[in-house]
Amino acid sequence: MEFLQENELYINQTVKVSLSKRLLKFFLVNLSRITPLYLYPNKVYFIYSHHVFTDEFEKFKRSILRLKKKFIFIDIEKAIELSKRKKLKKKYITLSFDDGMYNNFRAAEFLAKEGISATFFVNPEVIQHSANFNYIKSHCQERLHIKPIRFLNWEDIQLLKNMGHKIGNHGLNHKRLSNCTAEELIEQVEKSKKCLLEKIGEGVSTFAWCYGTSKDISKEAIQLIQKGHSSTFSAIRGFYKNGVNYHYRDLVIWYNSYHRIEFFYKLNCIKQWM
């Protein structure tokens, strides 16, 4: 009986602490809506997107131009290096795109004109079959849960490289790595990189795992990725943390306003203070 009472006391105290943290977070989040960005720490901000549809393109351009006023755009390799420094004099940002949708190509052209190098995490098997409607229809339904959409081909990938963009590994065909056998992991990680290198040559040093949450990756997958890649990327919001063997990235939907990007930067800072 004493054990139960002590346990109940512990639970009640935990709830009170949790509630106080929630109230503090609520206060800080709302404060972040009205406080200017320059008051927040200088960080390297990794953001990513899947698509830039036609009705998003103008907002995409406006968002990029506004971001250029408050952040310094850098390529992913420089971002990886700077993110591990304790102190930075400026705020930096790097942009990546997952899945290799063709609607990203127009965005890539605009970014190149603005002197911005982005990273495109792609699936080589999907690129190889980009002209096969039945394959693409099945891929979109089973892996992406969307209607069939056009994907980049190998010529497009080479053009992206020529513009100054980076190509990253996103697995062979967008499988959830946490569900893969040892043989399937080799296919998704090592074979995928080999396919990319055969087509575009050197420069495939980063890996972003599909679906991007901690539930979508395994320890074995992380270890295999790190053997052949310099850095691993998730789709989890936040800033780089020492001791964590992957980088965080914030999802951006360009149809939303620029203010949401700035808001989540501030929110990530608040999470580190908590």
Image (cartoon, rainbow, N blue to C red):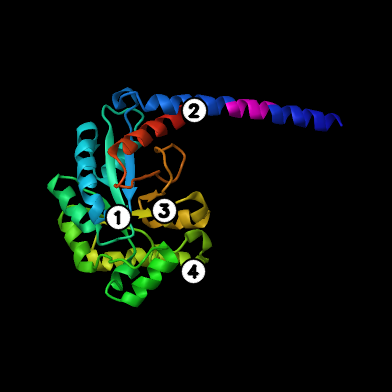
Amino acid at circle 1: His
Q: Which of label 4 and label 2 is nearer to you?
A: 2
Q: Earlier in the sequence, mark 1 or mark 4?
A: 1
Residue placed under numbered mark 1 in the picture: 51
Along the viewing direction, whichever of 260 and 129 lies nearer the viewer: 260
Label 2–label 3 contact, CB within 8 A = no
- Mark 1 vs mark 2, CA separation in Å: 31 Å
Q: Residues within 10 Å of mark 4 (few under 14, many from 20)?
A: few
Q: Residue at x 43, y 52 (%)?
A: 212
- Mark 4 vs mark 2, CA separation in Å: 44 Å
Dot 4 falls on a residue whose secondary structure is helix
Amino acid at circle 2: Lys
Instruction: Say whether residue 274 is visible.
Output: no
Q: Residue 20: where, in percent of width, then height?
A: 57, 24
Q: Earlier in the sequence, mark 4 or mark 2?
A: 2
Amino acid at circle 3: Gln
- The N terminus, quarter of image: top right
Residue placed farthest to the left in the image? 113
Q: Residue at x 51, y 59 (%)?
A: 178
Q: Earlier in the sequence, mark 2 or mark 3?
A: 2
Dot 3 falls on a residue whose secondary structure is helix
Tell me the number on the disc at residue 226.
3
Residue placed under numbered mark 4 in the picture: 183
Instruction: Say whether residue 45 is visible.
Output: yes
Along the viewing direction, whichever of 216 and 252 lies nearer the viewer: 252
Judge whether 225 appears above or below 236 on screen: below
- Mark 2 vs mark 3, CA separation in Å: 35 Å
Can you tell which quarter of the image residue 67 is in? top left
- Mark 3 vs mark 1, CA separation in Å: 27 Å
Q: Residue 209: where, in percent of width, then height?
A: 41, 55
Residue placed under numbered mark 2 in the picture: 25
